[in-house]
Amino acid sequence: MLAEDLKIEELVEFSQGHVSLQGRRLVLHDLHAFAQFRKDLVEMVGLAQARRILTRFGYFMGQADAAAMKRVFQWDSIEDLLRVGPRLHSLHGIARNVIKSLSLGEDGAFRMELVWHSSAEAEEHLDQLGKADQPICWMMTGYASGYVSFCLQRPVYFIEDKCRGKGDRVCTATGKNQEAWGDVISSYLPYFKADDIQGRILRLTEALKRRNHELQRHRQELAQFKEPIQHFFIEVRSPAFLKVLDIAQRVAPFDTSILITGESGTGKEMLTRYIHHLSHRANKPFVAVNCGGLSETLLESELFGHKKGSFTGAIDHRTGLFEQAQNGTIFLDEIGDISAAMQVKLLRVLQEREIMRVGESTPRKINVRILAATNKSLQEEIAKNQFREDLYYRLAVIEIEIPPLRKRREDIIPLTRYFVSQFAKKMNKSDVRINATCFDYLQAYPWPGNVRELENTIERAVVLSDGRVIQPMHLPPQLLQNKQGPELLEGPDLPSLATLETNYINHVLKMTEGNKTKAAQILGISQPTLWRKLKQIQD
């Protein structure tokens, strides 16, 4: 493990109401709020005492981070562990740390020179207290001192040489072991002294080790009994879809035929795979076929197989999908599109549990579970004599309807985040994230193409995002128009079409920060057309 290998998303666990670094709970704070706290602290207890409190705060945090790094990772050398301190400090967002020099002599002499770019602590001080006449990155010197002291198990102190808080271009600090400082350090020592910080850190570290060991044991126990829905479905929030998953889990252990209905793109095949995964056939084949994409002749050959020479092009024997799914599950998608003749043959399969290859006269026994799906109303197809009623009842022993995405809007945000992460990895844009302002547009849109359309939308946004953040401008125009429409049409007095167009153009320009090229792309018009419309608005 090297210092540069550390990434904050792999070190810190974020969950609602809880942030932790390898078992140690963290709390994020606002820079401006802490600046006000710093000002109040100085005014209440004086500059010297405020410095002592903040230095001790940083010292304790540095010791805690050093203990975590020693507890969690194996380091090739003490130098590698020492380099992690500045790296971890940078990941905290306090400053961009650069190690200018590091030396550790055989006689125990230690020296490290640090450069702190964009010090948040200096920014806090300047914001509320103005320019200082001495270095003021007290928490940062405390942190560096605490971290190295814990690693070396002897007192090491950092003194800030230059500071942005007093007008220097960057902040710099030098750290040495106490003996190397000599008498220079004596005036700084009162700021670092605290009651047995080292002992408290060691006790905390041991407690965290015990806690993590217990948590790991509990996770292993739970893993034996709990089937992870996340294997197939990311975080599900909507009651409608949670009900679908509950039914799927209840029927999965039994070989009952299931018909899954719902609009295109709702995830019918994913649900059938989930049911197969939870069934006793999970370790056997799962075979899927789109019945609507094949002609009757091809579909019969695909499902049942054929004998060599049974028709033109049958140059060899072929095993059908029913046989390939033996002891497993076959999924018949778009079952509502099959012909009347194929319906009769499929009904026989369900009744007799046997198939006959094209060109053969001997039936073959099969042992498969049949799951089917359709985006049509088979009841309406039966009423029009387009679908056999007896086949419907054979297929739909259990019928599960997947609600469209517009009826489970609670799932849009977690789905969006999942697709962003997936496409970011696929396109080697691992640092891409979505701006929260996009969510209003995504949740206001009706999603006629459901989850598949959302997936395509996010893929488009990841491709178009030229930076690290997906902004509303990267979403398709129809999403932005949809969000704007209801807001503009509220109230008793409806605006004119010209007013609607003007307001929408201004809205897009504001969103793109005046970039007319991007605005024209979102509006779906050429740049000359946009300039002409803007001139008309101004006139």
Image (cartoon, rainbow, N blue to C red):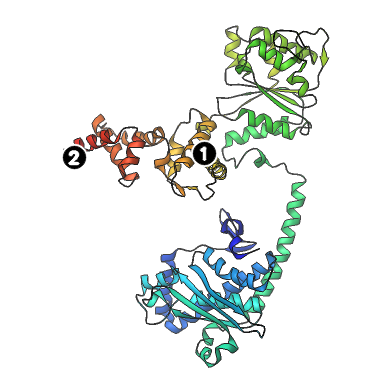
In the image, farthest residue toward the left:
539
Against 33, residue 473 (above or below) is above
Residue at position x 51%, y 34% in the image: 456
Pick the quarter of the image with the C terminus: top left
Question: Which SS class for mark 1?
Answer: helix
Q: Amino acid at mark 2?
A: Gln
Return the residue at label 1.
412
Task: Note whether 209 is above or below 267 in the view shown.
Answer: below
| In the foreground, 311 or 190 | 311
Q: Which residue is labeled 2 in the image?
A: 538
158 displayed left or right of 531: right
Left or right of residue 33: residue 144: right
Foreground residue, 63 or 396?
63
Gap in angstroms between the C-alphas marked 1 and 2:
39 Å
Q: Quadrant of residue 70?
A: bottom right
Query: Where 292 falls versus 173 (above or below)?
Result: above
Which image quarter holds the N terminus? bottom right
Residue 304 shows in this picture: yes
Q: Nearer the viewer, mark 1 or mark 2?
A: 2
Asked whether residue 435 is in view, the answer is no
Which image quarter: residue 209? Answer: bottom right
Taking depth in this image into account, of 50 and 242 the one nearest to the observer is 50
* Of callouts 1 and 2, the N-terminal one: 1
Query: Looking at the image, which residue is at 75% across and 18% down?
Result: 320
x, y percent for residue 227: 72, 41
Residue at the spot x=52%, y=39% of the render? 410
